[in-house]
Amino acid sequence: MNVKEILNELTLEEKATLLSGTDFMYTNPVPRLHIPALSMSDGPHGLRKQIGGSQDNGISESEPATSFPTAATTASSWNPENVYRMGKAIAAECANYEVDVLLGPGVNIKKNPLCGRNFEYFSEDPLLAGAFGTAEVKGIQENGVGVSVKHFALNNSENYRFVGNSVADERAMREIYLKPFEKVVKEAVPFTMMCAYNRINGTYCSENSWLLTDILRKEWGFDGAVISDWGATHQRVDGVAAGLDLEMPGDTAICRKWIIDAVNSGYLLQNKLNQAVENMLNLINKCQKNKIKQPIKKGELTEQMRNEHHALAAEIAVDSAVLLKNDGMLPLQESDSFLVVGELFEKMRYQGAGSSMIHPARLSTPQMSFEAAKVKYHYVKGYFENQVDPEEKLISEAINAAVKYDKILIFAGLTDYVEGEGADRENMKLPENQLQLIEKLCARKKEITVILFGGSSMELPFVEKVNAILNMYLPGQNGGYATTELLFGKRNPSGRLAETWVEKYEDVPFSQTYGKSAAEVYKESIYVGYRYYQTAKKAVRYPFGYGLSYTQFAYQDFSMTLDGERIEVTGKITNTGKMDGAEVVQCYVSGPGTRLWKPQKELKAFTKLYLKQGETGEVRLTIPVAELAVFLLEGKRFIVEKGTYNVQICKDANTVIWAENVELQGEEREQKEVPAADDIYREAKLDLVTDQVFETMSGVKIPSKEPSLPITLESRFTDLNQTFLGRILFKAVLSVAAGSEKKARKLPEGTERDNKLKGALFLKRILESNSILTMSMSAGKTFPYHFACGFVEMANGHIIKGIGCFLKVY
């Protein structure tokens, strides 16, 4: 397809059509000019290809595919090759179902442990998140399928994601939140980027020219297409002018009308429209040409391939599991018998809840794998995974059964009912029914191993009372097999935390304000995760990079050289234990002590060595000097400061094995008067950061609280409850989710019922957190723009105006 020629032949109406999606997951074709439609599909850790255009979030409404470990899990492997191989397998399954663009990966930073979508993001660290995002994109695109990297940008909470305003200083954005996206764009060249729902300093991402044009295209050189998250458009014409090419899911007649009217009136310049259309035509060309790389064609996915992908899911889960505690109880002995407690043993949580729920082609739970391995065990539920309140009968059964056993395995974790897309977690605790069960079993003074499942960090008040804790995160469809292999020592845990685990949620900076209002103020600036705890010298439960092994490793002969514009660190690691295993070598750098405040240390390189018993491996880590640059708010530029840098080889962020200084001849800044705000941030005294201190430091004004009345198109849907008619409308819409739940509860006990209930819960979360406008923009023909306007008028008591809106035709 000759893009320039096609561009000249397209009518204005056809151009507007190409900038809008259709049927929820497709772009519009232009048959007259032989322009095909593109097919898109969730998700980042496995394909969710919906059946027959159904938008039901129950997994039964999607084609069977491999459910791989989620991003929170894979990043804990500290081996990006895992997601490259995963991406290759996902691409094959996309080809099988004729999917052109996969929606993922998500490379947003984990700003707070309560974010309901943390399971879908890699890390609190931009280097780690960027490395994994880059590898996954390469794995998918090198095998014939495009990607859409999301959610660009500062989409770090769920409660107000549709209406939220991320208020942040540019230094934090440049050094932390934009860094993973920059790495992926420059190194993996993704076909598309997906803009987020939220605003950044007052401007929605979908119409933010600073984000979509100045940064993404002009600075980073991105030449792909920018698409909206589903329903994330607001002022569509402003979006086109700002750099948003494709509106998804589309079928919004008003947006096409706005574009056509704006061009005809001269408000939208023809060259802006043509650039967006050209980006879409180039995307279609790329996808068509890229198909030659696909390993299979439609319907050619064989049983052998399914088996290989199932095995790969287990391999990645094994490599990602983090052994948090072990006093010698693990690995378990096959000759022993065990009391197994916890319904997650039979109903393992293997994936996150929400739009990326996958219909697994296979499934192995711990119970299935224990049976296959002929483990001698007795099982009691202890709790229901779809509840949070304790059932005394279930707890008593577990306590009574414990009398006969010396060794107890407790399967626990975060369920879909306390963690999932669409809402942030209410707290960092395990469900109360699990906590009471664990506490009462610990009182029996038995040997206890806790196996955790979940997409984010948790409070562990029982940590001193149990013998071992194995964290599987969300291990994918073959997680049961992986768990069993690790528990019984067939494989050795080698995962390391890609996020900090604090003792209690109150230890997290600004924990009391996170997710509580539309304005999410990033007062911690660059002090995210371990950057804060290290600098402020705060104790944590488990530091970033932490993880145990069944074997031991010795670090030897480390040295460093400055080679031009690179720092090189070399050394040796020897497996000195009695079992094959893997060690993650982490390299952190501390910057010079200047007036420019900075974290105490930052991860700058890492590698993972797989070593057999007694084997020695070579370590070679390279740090480009340019990666040590810091961003100056004055002048808005990166500089490498002149001074002494301390390079550290660590087992985790807290444990330094080797360190050496290096002098860099960077830029020496003039010493000016230091503002009081800088002194506060220098020592990360975040409890002293007031609104005024943040504003002084950042130059960003914190907006005043937005009025919740009158109701507007941008109002959060729950705001409708403030008026009489609004409450009626709110209940009418929420009745859809209630109806789905009621229908699901009538189904017989089983997997289908469980999944339908989870789908209904996700729908409820999404409806509650949506804005009226984003609901319209994502619903297409079923809730058109004039209906949304009518909703607003009716909610505000303007019945006649509301009826007029409902009757209007575009």
Image (cartoon, rainbow, N blue to C red):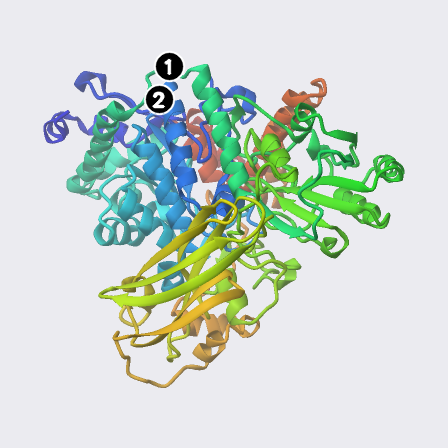
Q: CA distance from mark 2 to mark 1?
A: 9 Å
Q: Position of residue 156 (x, y in %)?
A: 48, 51
- In the rendered image, the quadrant that contains the N terminus is top left
Q: Residue at x 74, y 40 (%)?
A: 409
Identify the mark at residue 504; answer none if there is no mark: none
Res 201 seen here: no
Task: State the SS at label 1.
Answer: loop
Check residue 300 in the rendering and tell me which mark sits there, or answer none: 1
Residue drawn at (16%, 39%) of the image:
270
**Mark 1 surroundings within 10 Å by alpha-carbon count, few (fewer than 14), some (14 through 19), many (20 or more):** some
- Within the image, what quadrant is residue 744 found in? top right
Q: Quadrant of residue 258?
A: top left
Looking at the image, is mark 2 or mark 1 nearer the viewer?
A: 1
Which residue occupies 66% across, 21% down?
A: 743
> In what element is the residue under mark 2?
helix
As drawn, 627 above or below 772: below
- The x and y percentages for residue 604 are 38, 60
Is 802 situated left or right of 410 in this image?
Answer: left
Q: Amino acid at mark 1?
A: Glu
Q: Earlier in the sequence, mark 2 or mark 1?
A: 2
The image quadrant of residue 649 is bottom left
* Disc on res. 95: 2
- Tell me, yes or no, whether the two marked residues, 2 and 1, touch with CB atoms within 8 Å: yes
At which x and y percent is residue 318? 54, 38
Q: Amino acid at mark 2?
A: Ala
| Left or right of 475, for residue 5 | left
Asked whether, in this view, residue 462 is left or right of residue 3, the answer is right
In this orientation, which residue lies closer to the viewer: 219 or 64? 64
Task: Name the residue located 49 percent from the left edge and 39 percent from the top edge.
Answer: 772
Res 540 visible: yes
